[in-house]
Amino acid sequence: MRRAVPRIAVAAPPIAVVAATVLLWWLAVRTFEIPEYLLPTPGAVLEAVWVERDRLAWGMLATAIGASGGFAIAAALGIAIGSILGLSRFLERGFYPLTLLLQMVPLVALAPILVVWLGYGQRAVIASAAIVALFPVIANTLGGMRSVDRDLEELFSLHRAGLASRWWRLRLPASLPSIVTGLRIAAGLAVIGAIVGEFVSAYAGDRAPLGMVIVSAMREYRTDLMFGAIGLAAIVGFALFGIVNFGGWLLLRRWHASARSSSD
Amino acid sequence: MMRAVCSTTALAVAISLAGCGDPDATSRGRTSVSVQLNWVPEPEFGGFWQAELDGVFADAGLDVELIAGGPSVPSAQLIASGKVPFGIVSGGELLSINERGGSLVALFATFQGDPTAIMVHEASPWKTLEELWRSDATVACEANLPFVTFLNRKYGGENLKLVAHSTALANFVNDPTLAKQCFVFAEPVTLELQNVPVRVFPVLESGFNPYTAVLVTTREHLAANPETCRAMVMALRRGWDGYLADPTKANAAMAKLNPAMSVEAMNLAAKKQRFLVEDETTRSHAVGWMTGERWNTLAEQMNSLGKLEQIPDEIEAIFWQPPVDDGPMAPALEDSATS
């Protein structure tokens, strides 16, 4: 019989690592007398975040909208494309290299042309996020579709199940753990894609997204504000990851070992 | 020009681990120094290439390595941290980074007139910068730069839509309503050669006119190597004099290093930037000459715009330049022997 792990034992390791990292950071700045334009102290970053809280809150919201939009498109398209490619080896051989291109394409180089195609604002940001986040969803969906139990496939064949029924009742549920893994990876990537998109396509002003805040802060040597904005972008990524994780747990908790073990 | 985000942490750690060391070294009987440019080889750096090609650096006892910059190269931090002894920044950047712990000293101001401008399509309705700034146009620019805040203060700009600025011109060409930040001798020249007619509004006409493309070093480097710094400035003056007389040789050399800009474009750009390099001050002193009054004006303007918390106590301490009649250039080896 397994004993439940106390909550403090779960929370302590990450808290200790984060605290030690912040302490080392502070010590490094003090010991090596690193000037502010190279690396601010953790305290300076927190102060900048507090002073600029309104602007950064709007920035987080704008970036979260861009990243979520891109993630949603990547999730829908990725599951659809992965499922279609999983139908036949011919389709997979034909189209998989093309999807691989999405992984290889340097987004920083592609982003300016997205502005030409889609104009300034959230559309280019969402497209940028979707492009980066799409491949892991396709790859993991395809992997899931390819690893469906052969005996179950034959059972569905015996019952002359149609393509849609086979996908809905067998392949999609069997692929879910793999798809959730792909979505977790995509969640973090979507935020990176959104930030890169914002570098070249965002509107400036008091409600500018975090990508624009990062560029502006860097240009003014405000490393405190820049680090603060980067930290908040990471929080947006964590939040999106958490939502995906929770959704995955809801879908898998009753029958899959990965969700059951995490809920123990 | 957009200077995008760099890995500041990595840079800081690298500096801490490696130490700054002596950035100057002696080789072939000359002092080896590097200059970190803040952009790719273009006519704004013409004097450097001219000095190299004419052997002026060599005559001055210098072996100069010109390091090309780009949108992601953190030039100012590299110089301020001592990774390179010399480099190019804007006047505003110098004041900003010094307020955050840097110790940059200006040695030579290439542009007496700031080349920053806003360009619009010739068919657009805006005839002046003020008209544009009071409209509801979309302007691609670095919105946090001091000149944008200055224009907002002067002309309002409440209805403007400011969007991210990138070096790519495709979106400007495609959008006849878009206005875009540029250098008067760079993007408009490229577009002119592509038969895209534009109207250019220099920002300096609004009253905001910082020194631009400023050669800087750190206070520590200047104190330890005054002869090297002197030799560099004297050589650069001669280089610029040569480039202004005939830029074709240097332009051909730079065009080989920057395929994005043809020799034809460079020659045209060199003509267009001339009035920004030369003015009454440079004619009565020397090219690249700076005055405390100009630096003070910039510091006061940046302070009033909220871009600088304090005006430096001693404005004279942020720039240094050898007198015009400083005699023949002395070889710079003395410094390396003593440093």
Image: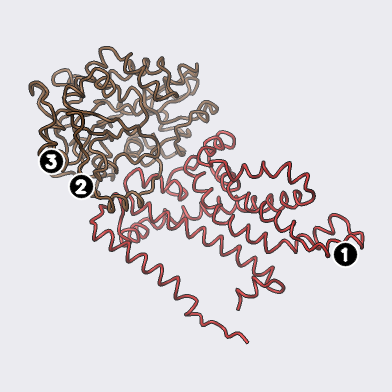
Which is closer to the viewer, label 1 or label 2? 1
Which of the labelled discs sits on residue A155, or is there none? 1
Q: Are marks 1 and 2 in contact (CB under 8 Å)?
A: no
Q: Which chain is brown?
A: B
Nearest the viewer among B327 and A203 is B327
Q: Which chain is red?
A: A
Tell me the distance, in whole angstroms, between the alpha carbons under discs 2 and 3: 33 Å
Residue type indicated by callout 2? Gln
Name the residue beneath numbered marker 2.
B310
Splitting the image into 4 quarters, where does residue B284 fall? top left
Residue B28 percent location from the top left of the image: 20, 28
Residue at the spot x=59%, y=34% of the render?
A: A117
Report helix, strand or loop for mark 1.
helix
Residue A82 percent location from the top left of the image: 71, 51
Which of the labelled discs sits on residue B339, or is there none? 3
Report helix, strand or loop for mark 3.
loop
Within 10 Å of the Cα at label 3, are there few (<14), some (14-19), or many (20+) other Cα atoms? few
Residue at the spot x=24%, y=60% of the render?
A: A30
Name the side, left or right, on which A196 lies relative to B41: right
Report helix, strand or loop for mark 2.
loop
Which is closer to the viewer, label 1 or label 3? 3
Residue type indicated by callout 3? Ser
Nearest the viewer among A83 and A205 is A83
